[in-house]
């Protein structure tokens, strides 16, 4: 009888992939005394560092435009501004089907102000990104865009605060082809989601075993990829089978929310979420907590609006302690105050520090879980707004700056309810958010109904999965016989719709297909595996031995590929 012994050792395998121009994920959320150099040496921007006066730049609107130098740094300034768009511009030529990544460094005078980068095209205005700029230091704006039609455009900057001067330096606009963009994704996946593995078969005396058949089957993927569920799954075996064969993480659509568990004040009922938790546990599916509180005034329990501020404060504290203590240690994260950039119900009732206080309270109730901000239109909409990346970071810093919150384990939840995705903006925005060092998840991914729904879903999932700083993805497609929120993955017989086919296609690409091969003359078989748990079966023609070996990749912690030697 053969007794398999596993011996793990690390070897360095160097794989070289050449790309014409790598993508630069660098972003900064710090306000610096000096700006960084322009990314990509400015790309197609003329005079990006302003080292040649105003060459390539002209007045836009009614502002006064100047070239200035502070210490050794040259930059462009717009002052005497009357309208939000009064600044300066540069003419560029944009091509359809190109992916443009944009960056610049911004400073303003007098007081902090939001500054946007805008492209005026013949079909309208395209926002590339925004930043909350400050006086006396430089802040990085990073964004991106695509255009529907090739043609001329004007890049300019705008701020609703016309009292500030706009200073800009280190401007970059770099185009990538679709092929180049895809190569960035492939390169990132190889670096961040996979490991090269070398398996060698030898006998008990250490002699190599060539021509040994190898079969590798993934049993569990490490990257969290999941979908929302609702209580319908509890009584529907076909739904259960379809779901559990695909996903490793979930979130409850409505069943854990305050208005579901405390319909009448003081009468708390967790029976339904308890059953859903048990279903998830029995199928080894991780759960996100959604949500503790919701800042939308229309999403409160019906009895809440009649409460005085004192009674509301007590009710809120009771809610946090009740639900988070109930499920303490059972969830991987909590959406603590949901959508509290687009809404401010608790701030309006309890004061501007309400959210900061509630995250502090949450950390005491379940300190082991990641505490998420969770909001929409952060990566879906490049036009700025309440939950833009800049405002998201400002909110995150506000919460962490509250007394006692400095060490909070915070997470960034991006709901990701898309219509038409602006993929370069998505990538750049995640770059910026990830610079906070908080975990980034896409938490409620869907695409509005339309002929391109499945195509857009695939674009979004590929972009998110390949981004080195995205820690997990959850789809917002809980099934109901009367229809899903915006996007279903199956019909009512649990046959895939085109969106479900996209999910299965990507799951197959991300490690779901078995790998087979034969060891070479040195008894070695080499492959590249997505991080996860695998069963390795080995059969040698001389012994009829069929060995099963469980192994797991190193999850990117050590980027040296793994070497597995099996002695039989």
Image (cartoon, rainbow, N blue to C red):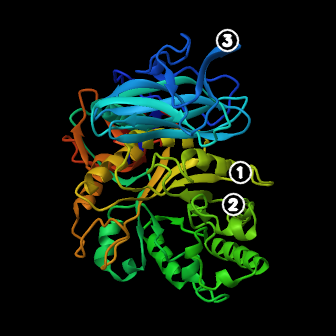
Judge from the rendering whether residue 442 lies leftward or rightward of residue 314; answer left or right. left
Q: CA distance from mark 2 to mark 1?
A: 19 Å
Quarter of the image where one finds residue 329:
bottom right
Q: Name the N-terminal-most of marks 1 and 3.
A: 3
Local packing at callout 3 (Cα closer than 10 Å; few below 14, some 14-19, many 20+) is: few
Quarter of the image where one finds residue 31:
top right
Against 166, residue 274 (above or below) is below
**Residue 465, disc:** none
For discs 1 and 3, the disc positioned in front in the rendered view = 3
From the image, tell me which residue sits under label 3.
72
Q: At which x and y percent is residue 320?
A: 68, 72
Against 256, residue 220 (above or below) is above
From the image, tell me which residue sits under label 2.
367
Q: Residue furthest left?
A: 541
Against 15, residue 360 (above or below) is below
Q: At which x and y percent is residue 466?
A: 40, 41
For discs 2 and 1, the disc positioned in front in the rendered view = 1
Q: Is residue 390 visible?
A: yes
Q: Residue furthest top?
A: 52
Residue under the point 43% across and 32% down: 101
Local packing at callout 1 (Cα closer than 10 Å; few below 14, some 14-19, many 20+) is: some
Residue under the point 56% across and 12% down: 53
| 323 or 525, nearer to the observer | 323
From the image, tell me which residue sits under label 1.
398
Q: At which x and y percent is residue 16?
A: 36, 22
| 403 or 278, nearer to the observer | 403
């Amino acid at each position: 009888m053969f007794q398999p012994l596993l011996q793990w050792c690390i070897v360095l395998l160097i794989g070289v992939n050449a790309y014409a121009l790598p993508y630069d994920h660098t972003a900064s959320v710090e306000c610096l005394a000096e700006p960084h150099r322009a990314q990509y040496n400015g790309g197609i921007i003329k005079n990006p560092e302003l080292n040649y006066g105003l060459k390539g730049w002209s007045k836009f609107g009614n502002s006064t435009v100047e070239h200035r130098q502070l210490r050794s740094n040259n930059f462009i300034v717009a002052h005497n501004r009357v309208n939000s768009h009064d600044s300066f511009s540069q003419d560029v030529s944009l091509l359809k089907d190109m992916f443009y990544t944009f960056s610049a460094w911004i400073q303003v005078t007098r007081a902090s102000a939001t500054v946007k980068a805008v492209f005026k095209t013949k079909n309208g205005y395209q926002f590339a990104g925004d930043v909350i700029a400050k006086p006396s230091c430089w802040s990085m704006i990073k964004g991106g865009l695509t255009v529907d039609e090739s043609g001329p455009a004007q890049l300019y900057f705008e701020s609703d605060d016309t009292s500030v001067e706009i200073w800009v330096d280190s401007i970059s606009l770099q185009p990538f082809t679709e092929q180049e963009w895809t190569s960035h994704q492939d390169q990132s996946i190889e670096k961040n989601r996979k490991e090269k593995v070398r398996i060698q078969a030898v006998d008990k005396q250490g002699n190599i075993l060539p021509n040994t058949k190898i079969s590798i089957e993934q049993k569990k993927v490490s990257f969290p990829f999941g979908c929302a569920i609702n209580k319908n799954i509890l009584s529907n075996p076909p739904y259960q089978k379809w779901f559990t064969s695909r996903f490793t993480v979930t979130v409850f659509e409505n069943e854990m929310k305050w208005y579901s568990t405390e319909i009448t004040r003081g009468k708390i009922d967790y029976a339904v979420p308890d059953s859903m938790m048990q279903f998830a546990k029995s199928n080894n599916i991780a759960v996100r907590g959604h949500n503790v509180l919701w800042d939308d005034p229309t999403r409160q329990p019906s009895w809440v609006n009649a409460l005085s501020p004192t009674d509301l404060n007590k009710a809120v504290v009771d809610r946090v302690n009740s639900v988070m203590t109930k499920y303490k240690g059972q969830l991987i994260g909590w959406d603590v105050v949901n959508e509290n950039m687009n809404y401010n119900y608790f701030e309006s009732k309890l004061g501007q520090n309400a959210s900061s206080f509630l995250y502090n309270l949450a950390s005491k109730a379940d300190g082991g879980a990641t505490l998420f901000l969770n909001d929409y239109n952060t990566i879906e909409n490049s036009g700025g707004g309440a939950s833009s990346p800049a405002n998201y970071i400002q909110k995150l810093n506000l919460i962490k700056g509250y007394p006692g919150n400095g060490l909070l384990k915070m997470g960034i939840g991006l709901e990701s309810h898309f219509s038409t995705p602006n993929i370069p903006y998505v990538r750049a925005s995640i770059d910026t958010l990830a610079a906070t060092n908080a975990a980034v998840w896409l938490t409620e991914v869907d695409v509005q109904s339309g002929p391109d729904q499945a195509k857009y879903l695939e674009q979004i999932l590929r972009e998110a999965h390949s981004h080195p700083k995205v820690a997990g993805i959850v789809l917002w497609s809980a099934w109901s016989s009367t229809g899903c929120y915006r996007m279903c993955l199956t019909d009512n017989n649990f046959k895939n719709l085109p969106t479900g086919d996209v999910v299965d296609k990507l799951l197959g690409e991300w490690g779901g297909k078995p790998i087979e091969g034969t060891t070479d003359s040195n008894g070695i078989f080499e492959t590249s595996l997505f991080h996860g748990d695998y069963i390795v079966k080995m059969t040698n023609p001389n012994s009829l031995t069929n060995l099963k070996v469980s192994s797991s990749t190193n999850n990117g912690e050590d980027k040296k590929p793994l070497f597995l030697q099996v002695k039989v």
